[in-house]
Image (spheres, rainbow, N blue to C red):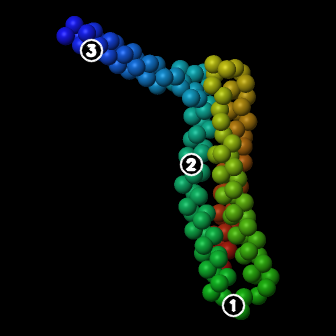
Amino acid sequence: MKNLKIIFVIGLFALTACSKTGEQDNSEPDTLSEESPNQALYDQVMDVHDEVMPRMDELMKLKRQLQEKIANTPDMVVEKKQQMEKMISNLDSASTAMMNWMHAFNPLPDSVDQEKAREYLESEMERIRKVKSLISETIDKAKEETRN
């Protein structure tokens, strides 16, 4: 009976230690913490991303419309068809630019080097703004093309 109590107490300590270890792991952020001096810059980068991301659906819809227009117009003038195919290619490029940015985006934690983390976020802000511009321009041109 005494051995059973000892085993029970040891088990309780083990469970308590495991739960505290788990809590410590959750408190360490993967990227930037809320107190980080670079958090505002990170938030701005993500705001641009969040503004552009919903436009990806619009981009794909326009691509399908152009593809359908080509498929449903067998007597389309060759130059017009080539122009529409180029627009589809531009839409694909804009989509790829966004996917590449998201795949490569990996901010440094401030704990590694605060200055390098800031420089990285500044360069990523420039990159995501270029992606935003590319997507906006491509969508605008594709909309014009689908109206014609």
Tell me the SS state at disc 1: loop
Disc number lying in front (3 or 2): 3
Residue 46 at x, y = what percent? 58, 40
Front position in the image: 133 or 84 = 84
For the point 74% across and 81% down, the residue is 81
Relative side of 3 to 55, left or right: left
Upstream in sequence: badge 3 or badge 2:
3
Work out whether 91 lies above or below 40. Answer: below
For the point 72% across and 43% down, the residue is 127
Q: Residues within 10 Å of mark 1 (few under 14, many from 20)?
A: few
Residue 21: which numbered mark, if any? none
Q: Name the residue under label 2.
A: 51
* Outermost residue toward the top in this view: 2
Residue 8: which numbered mark, if any? 3
Q: Which amino acid does label 3 sit on?
A: Phe
Q: Which amino acid does label 2 sit on?
A: Glu
Front position in the image: 141 or 2 = 2
User: Which corner quadrant of the image does residue 137 belong to?
Assistant: bottom right
Residue 74: which numbered mark, if any? 1
For the point 60% across and 75% down, the residue is 65
User: Which corner quadrant of the image does residue 21 belong to?
Assistant: top left
Q: Evaluate whether residue 96 shows in this view.
A: yes
Disc number lying in front (2 or 1): 1
Residue 11 at x, y = what percent? 32, 16
Work out whether 27 lies above or below 100. Answer: above
User: Which quadrant of the rendered structure holds the C terminus?
Assistant: bottom right
User: Which quadrant of the rendered structure holds the N terminus?
Assistant: top left
* Outermost residue toward the left in this view: 1
Disc number lying in front (3 or 1): 3
Instruction: Report the Cα–Cα distance between label 3 and label 1.
Output: 79 Å
* Outermost residue toward the right in this view: 79
Upstream in sequence: badge 3 or badge 1:
3
